[in-house]
Image (cartoon, rainbow, N blue to C red):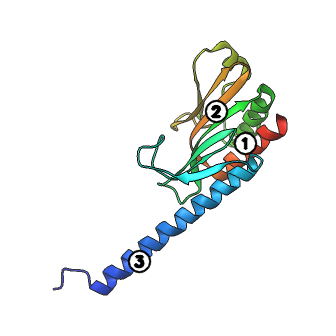
Amino acid sequence: MNTTMSEASSTSLRMAVEAARAAAKAAAHTAALILIEADGGGGNIHRAWRGEGPADAWCVVTSAHFTAHLLSESHGDRAHVTLTGITPAAYEQMRTWAEDRDDCRHDHGCVCLDDPWPTLAFLSESTEECRIDYRRADEDERGSARLAFNRITVTLFDEPVTVVDTLLRIARAAA
């Protein structure tokens, strides 16, 4: 009985894994360009160094209104992002859009939250970061929001780039 993998199989597997990794890295750089475009076209992409930021990332995107780490545990399509300088009106539009997108479609026995994103009034009353949740109460924390000097900072820990793109466009349009 042969208990070792053949050299051809080993080489094929290694090449397939390297190709998948290269594809995910290319997807992350494409996602970075999409986020820069959503914020008006100004921004930089640089290589993420181990330990730089909240998680390992394919790359880091910086712009005037956000910083995003394209998460390496994704296929290049998810980001840890901090959106800055959001006006109260833009935040309310972002919150409404996000909550409508994740609207509860369950019956009366569900455990979904009515307001997973903190309201502007709640942010105004708090001096600390406020938790942003997913709609379902049994899921992990989604991120946080904080109001300071009439501007809001939103951090989302693991968000699809398509969602971040829309949130950036809402913020820019309402600014």
Give me the disc on residue 15: 3
Asked if residue 62 is positioned above or below residue 28 in the image, the reply reads above
Task: Please say whether residue 115 is visible from this viewpoint.
Answer: no
Which residue does the image show at 75% across and 36% down from the upper left? 94
Q: Amino acid at mark 1?
A: Leu
Query: Up-down: is 12 above or below 68?
Result: below
Percent from the top left, x then y, of residue 56?
45, 49
Seen from the viewer's position, the closer of residues 110 and 161 is: 161
Amino acid type of disc 3?
Met
Quarter occupied by residue 97: top right
Residues at marks 2 and 3, CA–CA distance in whole angstroms: 39 Å
Q: Dot 1: within a 10 Å radius of its alpha carbon, few (fewer than 14), some, or many (20 or more) residues?
A: many
Residue 167 percent coordinates (x, y): 72, 42
> Image quadrant of residue 83?
top right
The residue that disc 1 covers is 167
Q: Quadrant of residue 76?
A: bottom right
Give coordinates of residue 87: x percent, y percent: 77, 28
Q: Are marks 2 and 3 in contact (CB under 8 Å)?
A: no
Label pair 1/2, CB-CB below 8 angstroms: yes
Q: Is residue 133 above or below residue 62?
A: above
